[in-house]
Structure formats: C-alpha cells, structure tokens
Amino acid sequence: MTEDARFEDGGDRPLNLGAEDTEDLQVISALVQDAVLPVTEIRWQRSQRRLALLINRLRWEDVDAAQRRGRPVERVQALLVVSEVLSVASQGIDRRDRDTVLSLLSVDFEPGEDGTGHIVLTLAGDGAIRASVEALDVSLRDVTRPYVAPSGKLPDHDRT
C-alpha cells in the first residue's frame, strides 16, 4: 500500500515540476503565487518557442513548517518555463523601465481548439502576460538554495 506524498517529505529538495493539464497547472500556479521578478528576467525565445521567467518564489510548501518551528519564511529562485509558445503579448508592463519589479498572482490556461490555447500569467497591478501555445506545457524548477525572504513576512491577502 502506498501513501500520498506530503510536503514534509520534500525537505529542502528543489522542486522540479511539469504541467501538461489544467490540474497540474493549478499546482504550479499555487506554488508561484506571490513570486516576484524584475522585468529584465523575462525571456521570449522565439526560435525555441519558449517563454522563460526567472522568479523569486515564496516557498509555500515550507510555510507551515517554518511557522511551527519559528523559522523565517523563505524564497527560492526558480525557472518558470512555458513551452510550445507561438506568440507572446503583454499588458500593463513597461519593459523599458528596467527597475520594475513584477508580482505574479496566478498562472492559468484558456483552452482553444485541439489542445491549443493561452497561458495567462496574471500580475499584480492589472498586468498580464499571455502566451499563445500549441499545447499546455509548463515547467517549474528551483535553481538556487532557499534564502530568507527579505521582508520576513508572508503576503497579506487570501490565497487562491
């Protein structure tokens, strides 16, 4: 008999997740909620059909354990990659202002015909990035060790 995995079983191991359906994407969306990134860390790699974002995500999977043990909350740098991208559009983002820091609220999929659709990255302040995709293919991979969140606090809002 096998048990379901628990967050506690993960320890400090880096996440490496993929999503090819909307249920998997909901998991990734929950894990990247409240991630922050400079506008300069967004790359649309047209020839590779890939949109990549280097984010500083809150380690939601560790928050309960950190609070129980009196540890500060942590963040980790991670790559959020959307593959099979045909085109990218954005609104509410000034790419010329290189000091802009964006806050990611959610990642959603708007289905089209025959597996195509749009991956929508919703940002705080009414910003959004919309990638037209041939198929739902999103990955999230931690690329650094966790570090203490500079604010030392959790975001003050309801989680989705």
Image (cartoon, rainbow, N blue to C red):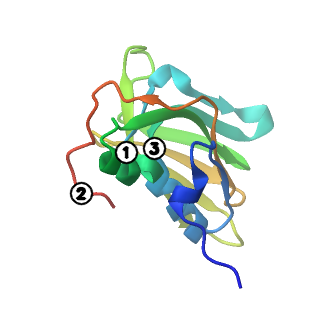
Measured as percent of width and height from the top left, residue 134 is found at 72, 57
* Few, some or many residues within 10 Å of mark 1 (<14, 14–19, 20+): some
Outermost residue, front side? 69
Does the image show residue 33?
no
Q: Which residue is mark 2?
A: 158
Indicate which disc, 3 or 2, sits on the residue closer to the N terminus.
3
Tell me whether circle 1 and circle 3 mark residues in contact (CB < 8 Å): yes
* C-alpha separation, residue under disc 2 versus residue under disc 1: 19 Å
Outermost residue, bottom side? 1
Disc 1 element: helix
Is 53 placed left or right of 38 in the picture?
right
Measured as percent of width and height from the top left, residue 145 is found at 58, 30
User: Nearer the observer, disc 2 or disc 1?
Assistant: 1
User: Nearer the observer, disc 3 or disc 2?
Assistant: 3
Measured as percent of width and height from the top left, residue 50 is found at 70, 40
Identified by mark 3, the residue type is Arg
Q: Which residue is mark 1?
A: 66
Identified by mark 1, the residue type is Ala
- Vertical relation: 139 (above or below) 150: below
- Split into 4 quadrants, where in the image is the N terminus? bottom right
The residue located at (27%, 42%) in the rendering is 154
Disc 2 element: loop
- Vertical relation: 118 (above or below) 95: below
> 15 or 52: which is nearer to us?
15
* Few, some or many residues within 10 Å of mark 3 (<14, 14–19, 20+): many
Indicate which disc, 2 or 1, sits on the residue closer to the N terminus.
1
The label number, if any, that marks residue 59 in the structure image: 3
Is 59 placed left or right of 154 in the picture?
right
- Vertical relation: 45 (above or below) 14: above
